[in-house]
Each structure stands twice: as C-alpha cells, then as structure tokens.
Image (tube, grey):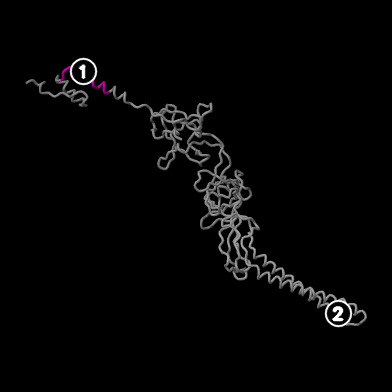
Amino acid sequence: MSLIGKTEYPAPGTGVERDSLRRYVSRGLVPIGLLAALALGGCEDKAQSQAAAPPAPPVTVAQPVKRTVTDWDEFTGRFEAIEEVQVRARVGGFVNSVEFKDGAIVKAGDLLYIIDPRPFEAVVLQAEGQLADARAKGELAKRDLERGLNLVQTSAVSEQVVDQRRQALQAARAAETQAEGALKAAQLNVEFTHVLAPITGRVSRHLVTPGNLVQGSEGGSTLLTSIVSLDPIYIYFDVDETTYQRNSRLWFEGKRPSSRDTPNPVQVTLTGETKPSHEGKMDFLDNRLDVSTATLRSRAIIPNKDLSVLPGQFGRVRIVGSSPYEALLIPDTAIATDQSRKIVFVVKDDNTVEARPVVLGPLDEGLRVIREGLKAEDHVIVDGLQRARVGAKVTPKMAQAPAGDKAPAAPAGDKPAAGAKP
C-alpha cells in the first residue's frame, strides 16, 4: 500500500494550521486539486468576512444651544398663612348657634357664633338705670351749687356750704362717668355674644356645638375655630451658608441685587409638578443664621388668586443666583456618566466618536447648561447613545427643525426628527 493512500489530508475550510499544511506540501503528499480547493475556500472565507462587516450605526446629532441664561438657586420651603387667627369666646355663656359652614371662605365681619345674649342685655338695663340715676344726682348737685353761689353774695349761706355743694357736684359728675363706663362695658359684652370673623380667609371646622357652655376671657377663653388667610401666602425656606456667602459676594461686586432691599423674583414648584407654577418675590431675610443648621431663614410672598395653595404645603423655591450670562446648553439625556465624571459623545469630522468630559451647570427650560468642555460648533450625539462607541465610526444625522421651519438643522433644544427619541 502506498504512502499516499495512508495519509489523511486536511479538509478545505477546517482551519488546519499553515505549518502542518506546509509539511504535507514539502513532502509532496498533497495533490494539486486539493491545493486548489484549499485556496478557493480561503478566498470564499475572506469574501464572506468582508461582506459581513456591519455599516456604521446611525446616530442623531445637534449643536449646543447658545443663549443668555440666569442661574437659579433651589430650596425646599413650606407655605404659611400671612394672617392666622384663633377665634375664641370673649364672653362666657351658652352657644345658641353656629353661623358658618366648616371649611368655607369667610370675610372680615361675617357672623360665626351666637352666644346667649340675655344675661348681658339685663346687665345693660341695670347700667342704663345707674347712669340715669347718676345724671339726676348730678343735675341736682348743679342746681344746689347755683343757689349757693347766689345766696353767698347776701351772706345767707357761708362759703363752707358753697364748697360742700361744689364738691357734691364733682362727685355726682364722677359717678355719672363711672355709670357711662359700666354701660359701655355691658354693651360690649352684648356685642361680643355675636362672634365675628376678624379677618378674611378660610375657616376651619367648628369646635363647639350649640348648647355648650363656653368660657370668656375672664376664665380662660374657649377656642371656637380658626381662620387663615390664603391670598397672598408666604413660603419660608432656609438658605445654606455657602449660598448666602456667594450671593453676598455677588452683591458686593454689583452682579446681583440683595434680597434684603430688592424684591428678587422667585418661582415655586409644587409637589408633583415638573416645572414652576407660581411666581412671587422675596419679602424677608432673617438677621442671623441658625447656629444648629447654619442656614438663614428666608421668606417669599406668593400670589394665590385661585386659593389652591394651603398653609402647610411643601414647595421647591427657585431664586435668582447670578447675573445673566451667555451659555451653551444641551438636552439632559445627551449626558452620560463615567464613574465620577460627566461626559458627552461628540462626532468628529471623520465621523468617529469622542468622549468629552464636561462640567455641568443648572437646568434651564429643560436644557442643561454646560460650563466647560464643549464648543458651539461641536456635534453632540443626542439620540442613539447606546449605539456609539468611542473611536468607532457612526453615521451622523442632524436633528431636524420643527415642522414649518426652513432651517435645515436645529440646535439641541429643538424638536428632534421623526423617529428620533424625545
């Protein structure tokens, strides 16, 4: 049996190492046909690998928006009423009726409670009688004094008698004044039996029902209900020491007005909202920092025309933190995180992707301010970040302008093209 008959040749495309194939060829053990088949198989593999190379992935790019922005400082605050009153009984007695609906809006002077006025009306009658008696005695003392002055001229009475009558008139007038005061006090008590709303606002529930005995101011007055004003309304928040020092420095440099003497604008975002819904102005800064929290108590006043905001609610307060300046902005979704760094992916002129570290600023109308790391002419990937690889090529597509615009490309803050992610 020949040697060739005993030899096993490598099959085409099986990936046998080249040095093994060379050994077969050097010994003359490989037929020409087999060599041709192997060569043809290698060419086919190369052609298949070239045909299988994927195209550069498509991405959407846009240039940063350049516009004038103002930084805002943001804090958590709580709303409080400008006016808050605890309505208490000013006279004691039994409650006859409750004249308001729980939780309703009341105006100053509206009737809230009626306390039984009859005991106080009786006291008024007594005071009126005492006043009439004092006035009658005063009139009699006046006439006695006049007669004494006439008689003393003829020495019919002595000077001592005249002095006594003069003193009696003064005492009668003093008694009359006391009686007038007692009558006014009694009339006030009758007036206090009708409990009126001292301010305009929303009333709480009634705490005393008809038939109950309430105490007046003499014996510890009974709490009847409470009223809070709603429009406008305060919001209190605490400014940290670092922000306070920065704002003070800007004020000394003339770059930002102080909220102590200027009603700087504020914006408030309520719980569950994504953007500010109420606007107001600064109203107060405390005169010292809290030593336990190193914060400065601050206050803004907010219009509340629809009465939708109630005391006790939370809100996010935004206050001007800088003077206006030119800035570059991109969508927040175009920013990625690389450990502790923030990066964006920029498409260079040769369509390769570069990771660019950036320094972020605040959000402004849905876009993120980029303080460092970008130029206005850069093309930032705003859609397709998951398909981009650093150093690899991509197929960039400029974000289209909103329908109706003639501009071929739009900045990063405009509406993306159809099919692009928002």
Residue 311, given in percent of the width and then of the height, sits at 55, 54
Residue 184, given in percent of the width and then of the height, sits at 71, 68
User: Label 2 is placed on what type of residue?
Assistant: Val
Residue 99 highlighted magenta (yes or no)? no
- Neighbour tally class for label 2: few under 14, some 14-19, many 20 plus, Cα within 10 Å: many
Q: Nearer the viewer, residue 135 or 201?
A: 135
Q: Residue furthest left?
A: 1
First reached walking from the N terminus: tag 2 or tag 1? 1
In the displayed structure, 71 sits above or below 177; it is above
For numbered disc 2, what is the local secondary structure?
A: helix
In the displayed structure, 244 sits above or below 363; it is below
In the figure, is residue 313 to the left or right of 32?
right
In the displayed structure, 402 sits above or below 298; it is above
Q: Nearer the viewer, residue 410 or 173?
A: 173
Residue 71, given in percent of the width and then of the height, sits at 55, 42
Prevailing secondary structure class for the magenta stretch in the rendered image? helix
Q: Nearer the viewer, residue 420 or 91?
A: 91
Q: Which mark is residue 78?
A: none
Q: In the rendered structure, are the residues bearing label 2 and label 1 in contact, judged by CB atoms less than 8 Å apart?
A: no
Location of mark 2 (residue): 162
User: Label 1 is placed on what type of residue?
Assistant: Ala
Q: Nearer the viewer, residue 27 or 384?
A: 384
Q: Quadrant of residue 41?
A: top left
Q: Residue furthest right?
A: 154
Q: Residue furthest top?
A: 32
Q: Which residues are magenta?
A: 30-45
Location of mark 1 (residue): 36
